[in-house]
Image (spheres, coloured by chain):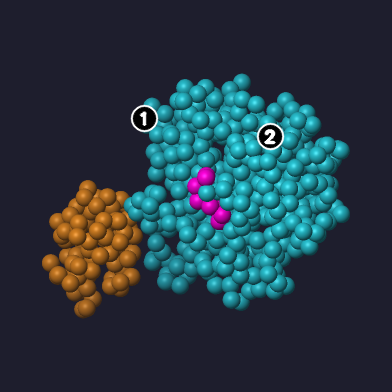
């Protein structure tokens, strides 16, 4: 996992979930551990799209279970964009 | 018929947070007007409002879940928490379905709608924040009370402007009388925001438009407009026997409520106040009281020329010569115009008056207006034991509400 990207995304997830950054780990389950419901999941996606100027497909959002999966997806999308 | 009594009061106001601070503020004739910090008024002539600058919901509600709430929802959730604590009431699986929520709110979502639209227009529709969308509807504050406190009975929002919270309380009283609820959290909320402020500024309703210092002086000859304000008030309305079985303190009984719509009012107050007279007469009838038995009137006068004159005229028409013997005072002289919250703030003030035997004053009263010639309890609170009080609400669009409140056991 890209560490810098990981830290930035944990900061976004912390802001939206209400959990402290220290409580969030790459393997944290967004829904079960961090109480990220469907609206918060879209909110996280929108925040990430704004920050990294990538486009997350709506159908991919429900498949993102852990923080690590979010980071990996964004890293892939940035790579595809040549960032 | 079942009786609806008041067992809890939660207040977030410019003159005090919590019931005791609020009552104390009213009796000390404290005013809640200060320079606006929520938005920029440098291009305007008016810079003062009843802004609640020291409001921090986190100590009361905790940090979690507040991030996406708009100001109205934070204000009313805090007031709801105060009211539940004051009534010593805990929502459980046993009472959740017989507990309801009834909130008056009218302009509360304007700010959220504007912000949501601004984000969509500036950043593009893909980047609007979905969690801000629920705030754009006016029933969001009431709904968030039910969600936060796990209240599963009815949930209603009433948007009748200046009358909204008295109407919401009246609706709660009906639910209790008909046996459809044992407990209702009822009240109102309005937040101060630039959208509402600019609207009333352009309508010419605010004091200080000519660049002079704004003054909220109901019934005074020199009144020239109101001062906008914000706040939330939530009261616990409860079925009498339910309250007694809980061993709860009972503050007062809501004995009569009535409404009337004045079709002659179109963006201005009608001179005669036929609608308000009708509402008063119906409320008295429902409370089984003759006009002579009313000992205090909590006025809705807000320092605009039309409303203060209309209310005085309607009181004189209903009460005849007795009108001159009834103390009439307006808490808006200290708090300003809180629209949908104003009726609930009045009811909370009257409840304090019935409890303590002290009538809150009309402050900033100096110069008599020949058209407003009643006893307005000028400038200082007055000791008086009261059994029956009348609360009024009237707006320039035609809504009128009257409520009769009795001292408990009186």
Toward the bottom, the furthest residue is A82
- Name the quadrant containing residue A24: bottom left
Q: Which chain carries label 1?
A: B
**B112 to the left or right of B333:** left
Chain B display color: cyan
Chain A display color: orange
Q: Position of residue A80 (x, y in %)?
A: 20, 74
Q: Is residue B335 visible?
A: no
Which residue is at a point 45% across and 53% down the rendered structure image? B74
Q: Position of residue B170 (x, y in %)?
A: 62, 36
Q: Which mark is residue B386?
A: 2
Toward the left, the furthest residue is A1
**B358 to the left or right of B318:** left
Say if labels 2 and 1 share a chain.
Answer: yes
Q: Which residues make up the magenta segment?
A: B13-20
Q: Position of residue B168 (x, y in %)?
A: 59, 40
Camera-nearest residue between B228 and B180: B228
Which-is-in-front pick, marks 2 and 1? 2
Residue A4 painted magenta: no
The residue at which mark 1 appears reads as B93
């Amino acid at each position: 996992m890209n560490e810098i990207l990981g830290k930035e995304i944990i900061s976004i997830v912390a802001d939206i979930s209400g959990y402290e950054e220290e409580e969030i780990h790459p393997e944290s389950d967004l829904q079960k551990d961090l109480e990220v419901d469907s609206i918060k999941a879209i909110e996280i996606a929108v925040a990430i799209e704004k920050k990294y100027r990538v486009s997350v497909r709506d159908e991919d959002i429900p498949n993102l279970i852990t923080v690590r999966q979010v980071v990996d997806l964004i890293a892939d999308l940035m790579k595809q964009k040549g960032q | 018929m079942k009786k609806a009594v008041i067992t809890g009061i939660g207040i977030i106001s410019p003159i005090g947070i919590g019931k005791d601070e609020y009552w104390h503020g009213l009796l000390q004739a404290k005013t809640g007007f200060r320079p606006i910090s929520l938005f920029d008024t440098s291009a305007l002539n008016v810079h003062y409002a009843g802004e609640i600058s020291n409001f921090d919901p986190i100590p009361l509600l905790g940090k979690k879940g507040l991030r996406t709430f708009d100001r109205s929802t934070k204000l009313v959730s805090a007031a709801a928490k105060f009211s539940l604590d004051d009534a010593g009431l805990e929502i459980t699986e046993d009472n959740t379905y017989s507990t309801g929520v009834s909130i008056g709110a009218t302009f509360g979502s304007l700010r959220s709608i504007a912000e949501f639209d601004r984000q969509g227009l500036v950043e593009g529709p893909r980047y609007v924040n979905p969690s801000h969308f629920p705030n754009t509807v006016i029933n969001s504050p009431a709904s968030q009370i039910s969600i936060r406190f796990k209240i599963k009975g009815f949930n209603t929002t009433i948007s009748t402007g200046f009358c909204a919270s008295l109407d919401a309380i009246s609706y709660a009283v009906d639910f209790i009388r008909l046996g459809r609820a044992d407990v209702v959290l009822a009240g109102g909320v309005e937040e101060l925001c630039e959208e509402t402020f600019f609207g009333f500024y352009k309508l010419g309703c605010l004091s200080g438009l000519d660049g002079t210092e704004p003054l909220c002086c109901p019934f005074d000859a020199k009144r020239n407009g109101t001062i906008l304000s914000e706040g939330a008030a939530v009261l616990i309305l409860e079925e009498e026997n339910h309250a007694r079985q809980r061993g709860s303190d009972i503050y007062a009984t809501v004995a009569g409520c009535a409404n009337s719509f004045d079709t002659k009012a179109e963006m201005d107050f009608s001179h005669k106040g036929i609608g308000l007279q009708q509402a008063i007469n119906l409320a008295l009838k429902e409370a089984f009281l003759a006009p002579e038995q009313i000992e205090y009137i909590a006025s809705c006068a807000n320092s605009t020329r039309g409303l203060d004159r209309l209310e005085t005229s309607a009181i004189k028409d209903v009460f005849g010569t007795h009108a001159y013997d009834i103390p009439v005072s307006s808490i808006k002289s200290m708090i300003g115009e809180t629209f949908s919250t104003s009726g609930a703030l009045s009811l909370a003030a009257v409840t304090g008056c019935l409890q303590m035997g002290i009538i809150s004053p009309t402050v900033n009263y100096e110069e008599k207006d020949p058209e407003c010639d009643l006893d307005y309890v000028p400038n200082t609170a007055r000791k008086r034991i009261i059994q029956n009080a009348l609360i009024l609400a009237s707006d320039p669009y035609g809504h009128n509400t009257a409520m009769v409140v009795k001292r408990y056991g009186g």
